[in-house]
Amino acid sequence: MNFEKIKSANLIVVKVGTSTLTHQSGYINIRRVEQLVKCLSDLQNSGKHVVLVSSGAISCGLGKIGLRRKSLTLEQKQAAASVGQCELMDMYNRLFADYGHTVGQLLLTKDVTDDEQRKEHAKNTLRVLIELGCIPVINDNDSVSSEGIKYGGNDILSAVVAMLCEADLVVNLTDIDGFFDADPKTAPDAKLISYVEKITPEVIEKAGGAGTERGTGGMAAKLIAAKQCTDYGIPMVIANGANPDILYDVMSGTFKGTFFDTLEA
Ligand code: GLU
């Protein structure tokens, strides 16, 4: 296993899912988010560049406006995203500022990244933010689009963002330890696969369906993201975000999780 690719990564896209950022109640998990921001700030201080792809807008918004999670219409979720995104950015802005870092928000949709000219604008904004030492915080623009809400939005978005900014590594922090040979929630003897050399159709077959009711991703979307990244030449890690300190272990190559390698040219 070649962890050099991780250790030498300079530009790192970190994706954090809703189930990691919020409690079951839907409200923000303050301790976890504070720890996450601390680790990301520390990574940035060490000379690396961090791009954060953060979910959680819909969940935070639902909590704030008092909408019940079950049986929501698309429009209600979009309204919740609009409220929750403010909550998220307010929090990131404050917490990163405590460590002397500046954040910039990008809300993307598929029609932006599919359009050459608009994609170029997003790419340039990202590049300049990174050059200036700012930390881009990115989410799907759910209030004006439905793709992200319907299917694994931010997992796929993290791959798109990694390609846009030519990242060296994607770290996907989620609510399980990594990619297993069966669903650990239903198969107690499922084994963690720590290294995937190549994402074959058989590997994808193992990934199963959707994630928690608070997020939309699930392992299937993470595998698609991993395939897009690794095909492009960017390795990806899936690890448990319950303790964001795991980012230190990831960067030193001593983590528990799954490493999706890129094929050598
Ligand atoms: N963009 C959604 C949000 O911020 C999350 C989508 C996902 O779970 O991937 O709530």
Image (cartoon, grey):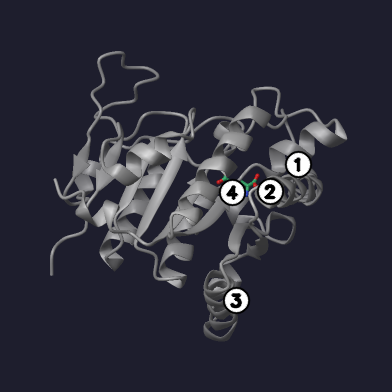
Counting from the top left corner in percent of width and height, residue 101 is at: 63, 57
Give the spatial CA distance, label 3 vs label 1.
33 Å
Of 86 and 112, the residue lying toward us: 86
* Mark 4 burial class by Cα count in 10 Å: few <14, some 14-19, many 20+: many
Q: Secondary structure at mark 4?
A: strand
Q: Earlier in the sequence, mark 3 or mark 4?
A: 4
Q: Secondary structure at mark 3?
A: helix
Foreground tag (2 vs 4): 2
Q: Report if the CB atoms under discs 3 and 1 are less than 8 Å apart.
A: no
Residue under label 2, please give it.
Answer: 92
| Residue drawn at the location 26% of the way across and 36% of the way down | 254
**Circle 2: residue type:** Tyr
Q: Earlier in the sequence, mark 2 or mark 4?
A: 4
Q: Earlier in the sequence, mark 3 or mark 1?
A: 1
Q: Which mark is residue 73?
A: 1
Relative to 119, residue 142 above or below: above
Q: Quadrant location of residue 166? A: bottom left
Q: Quadrant location of residue 121? A: bottom right
Counting from the top left corner in percent of width and height, residue 190 is at: 26, 21
Residue under label 4, please give it.
Answer: 54
Q: Report if the CB atoms under discs 2 and 1 are less than 8 Å apart.
A: no
**Circle 1: residue type:** Thr
* Mark 2 burial class by Cα count in 10 Å: few <14, some 14-19, many 20+: many
In this rendering, position of residue 7 left or right of residue 208: left
| Residue drawn at the location 31% of the way across and 17% of the way down | 187
Q: Earlier in the sequence, mark 2 or mark 1?
A: 1
* Mark 3 burial class by Cα count in 10 Å: few <14, some 14-19, many 20+: some
Counting from the top left corner in percent of width and height, residue 23 is at: 65, 25
Relative to 90, residue 247 above or below: above
